[in-house]
C-alpha cells in the first residue's frame, strides 16, 4: 500500500505517521509554511473563546503530540500583549501559569520594540485570572541585549546555541531575587528542548508567552515534524503538488516540477482558505482547491463549486465565520464520492480550525488510508 499525503502541517504529519504505523509506504509532499508553522504554541480543541472543557485523546494522539513537542493537559497560558487564557494543551516551551497561581512571576525586561515587560506585567496582573488567584507579575530587568535582533524568530534562533543559553542562564540567575518563575517572550529556541534546558539550569519554572505568527513555536513544530517523520520512515518531498488524477486502478499526484507519484491512496491535508489550500477564483466568483482534485467544496452542507448567481457566492448569508468553514465535503475521513481520497485538517468543510482537531483528523485519515 502506497499513500501520498499532500501537506506538512499538523494534520498532514498525523496522517503520514498513522498511515506508516498501519504498514503503508508513505510520501509527504509539502512546499511552504502553512498554518501549523505559524502556530502560537497553544493547542485547542475548539476556538479558545468557546472552549468547554477537556477532550479525551487516544494514546496515538497523545504520543504524536508529545513527539511534536506538545503537552495535552489543560493549562493556562498568556500572550505577549498580556491576555491570559485557558488552553487544552501547549508547546513545552510555553509557560503554564496554572501551577503558579498565587505565586510571583518575573517578566523578563529586555530592550525590544515588540516586548514591553512593564506593560505586559501590568496587563497580566489586571486579568481576571490573576486577580482571582492572587498571582503577581513583576517586570525584572536582566543584563541582556536583544535590540539588534529584528524578529522574535531571529532572537529564538540565538538560543539554539548552548553558549548563548548559558549566558542567558547567568543573567536570569542574577536577576531573579524573590520570584517563583520566569516569563519570557517567544524566544526560547527554534528547536525543541531549549526552554527545558534553561529551566533546569535556572532552577525555576520558566517559559514563553505565546508566539505571534511566524514565531518560535512554528519553527519548533517544523523541526519536531521533520524528526518525527524521519524516525517513522516517511519520505518527505519539499515540492508543490498541482493535481490528483485517477490512473489505472490507482491515483497519480502531479508535482509542479513534472514528476508524478503513483499512490493507492491520497490524503489531502493542505490547509483551508486562510492557509492557501482553498482559494477564491475571481474569474468565476467562486472557490476552488489550490490543486486539481476530484473533490467537492462546500460550506454549511451546501456545495460551492458551482456559482448560482451573477454575483457569486453570497458571503453574507453564511455569517462572519464563513471563510473558516469553506472546505472539502467529506464522508467520515474520505472525500465525498472518492473512496481513495482522504481529507484532514483545515481543508475539511465545516470543522473548527484548531490544532487538536487537525491532529485527530489527520490520524483518522491516515489510519483509513493505510488499511
Image (spheres, rainbow, N blue to C red):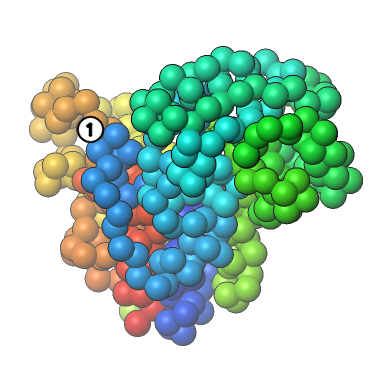
| For residue 28, side relative to residue 107 (left or right) | left
Q: Is residue 138 above or below residue 237?
A: above
Residue 223 shows in the view: yes
Please tell me which residue lies in front, 293 or 62. 62
> In what element is the residue under mark 1?
helix
**Viewer-proximal residue, 144 or 221?**
144
Looking at the image, residue 32 sits to the left or right of residue 84; the answer is right
Picture layout, residue 125 above or below residue 74: above
User: x%, y% of residue 163?
Assistant: 89, 46
Residue 320 on image: x %, y %: 22, 26
Residue at 10% in and 32% down = 308
Q: Position of residue 214 (x, y in %)?
A: 58, 35
The residue shown at (29%, 34%) is: 49
Looking at the image, which residue is at 53% across and 27% down? 136
Q: How would you rate the neighbour count of disc 1 (Cα within 10 Å): few for under 14, some for 14-19, many for 20 or more?
A: some
**Direction from residue 225 to residue 108 in the image, left or right:** right
Q: Quadrant of the N terminus?
A: bottom left
Q: Which residue is mark 1?
A: 322
204 or 9: nearer the eye? 204
Q: Position of residue 197 (x, y in %)?
A: 73, 53
Residue 369 visible in this rendered orientation of the protein? no
Q: Quadrant of residue 106?
A: top right
Q: Which of the pair 255/193 is nearer the observer?
A: 193
Q: Quadrant of the C terminus?
A: bottom left
Query: In the rendered image of this protein, does residue 234 appear above or below residue 357?
Result: below
Q: How many marks?
A: 1
Amino acid at each position: 500500500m502506497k499513500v501520498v499525503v499532500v501537506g506538512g502541517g499538523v494534520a498532514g504529519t498525523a496522517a503520514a505517521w498513522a498511515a506508516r504505523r498501519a504498514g503503508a509506504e508513505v510520501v509527504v509532499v509539502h512546499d511552504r509554511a502553512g498554518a501549523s508553522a505559524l502556530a502560537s504554541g497553544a493547542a485547542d480543541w475548539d476556538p479558545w473563546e468557546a472552549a468547554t472543557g477537556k477532550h479525551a485523546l487516544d494514546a496515538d494522539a497523545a504520543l504524536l503530540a508529545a513527539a511534536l513537542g506538545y503537552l495535552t493537559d489543560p493549562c493556562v497560558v498568556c500572550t505577549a500583549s498580556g491576555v491570559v487564557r485557558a488552553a487544552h494543551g501547549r508547546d513545552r516551551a510555553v509557560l503554564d501559569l496554572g501551577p503558579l497561581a498565587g505565586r510571583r512571576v518575573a517578566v523578563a525586561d529586555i530592550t525590544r520594540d515588540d516586548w514591553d515587560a512593564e506593560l505586559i506585567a501590568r496587563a497580566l496582573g489586571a486579568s481576571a485570572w490573576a486577580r482571582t488567584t492572587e498571582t503577581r507579575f513583576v517586570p525584572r530587568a536582566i543584563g541582556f541585549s536583544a535590540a539588534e535582533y529584528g524578529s522574535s524568530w531571529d532572537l529564538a534562533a540565538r538560543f539554539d546555541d548552548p553558549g548563548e543559553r548559558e549566558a542567558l542562564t547567568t543573567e536570569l540567575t542574577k536577576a531573579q531575587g524573590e520570584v517563583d518563575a520566569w516569563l519570557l517572550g517567544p524566544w526560547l529556541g527554534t528547536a525543541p528542548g531549549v526552554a527545558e534546558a534553561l529551566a533546569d539550569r535556572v532552577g525555576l519554572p520558566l517559559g514563553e508567552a505565546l508566539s505571534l505568527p511566524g514565531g518560535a513555536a512554528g519553527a519548533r513544530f517544523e523541526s519536531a515534524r521533520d524528526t518525527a517523520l524521519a524516525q517513522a520512515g516517511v519520505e518527505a518531498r519539499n515540492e508543490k503538488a498541482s493535481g490528483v488524477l485517477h490512473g489505472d486502478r490507482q491515483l497519480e499526484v502531479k508535482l509542479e516540477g513534472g514528476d508524478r507519484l503513483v499512490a493507492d491512496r491520497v490524503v489531502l491535508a493542505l490547509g483551508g482558505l486562510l492557509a492557501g489550500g482553498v482559494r477564491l477564483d475571481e474569474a468565476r466568483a467562486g472557490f476552488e482547491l489550490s490543486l486539481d482534485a476530484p473533490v467537492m467544496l462546500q460550506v454549511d452542507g451546501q456545495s460551492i463549486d458551482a456559482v448560482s448567481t451573477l454575483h457569486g457566492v453570497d458571503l453574507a448569508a453564511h455569517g462572519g465565520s464563513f471563510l473558516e468553514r469553506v472546505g472539502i465535503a467529506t464522508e467520515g475521513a474520505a472525500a465525498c464520492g472518492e473512496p481513495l481520497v482522504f481529507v484532514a485538517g483545515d481543508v475539511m468543510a465545516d470543522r473548527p480550525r484548531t490544532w487538536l482537531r487537525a491532529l485527530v483528523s489527520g490520524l483518522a485519515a491516515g489510519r483509513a488510508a493505510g488499511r
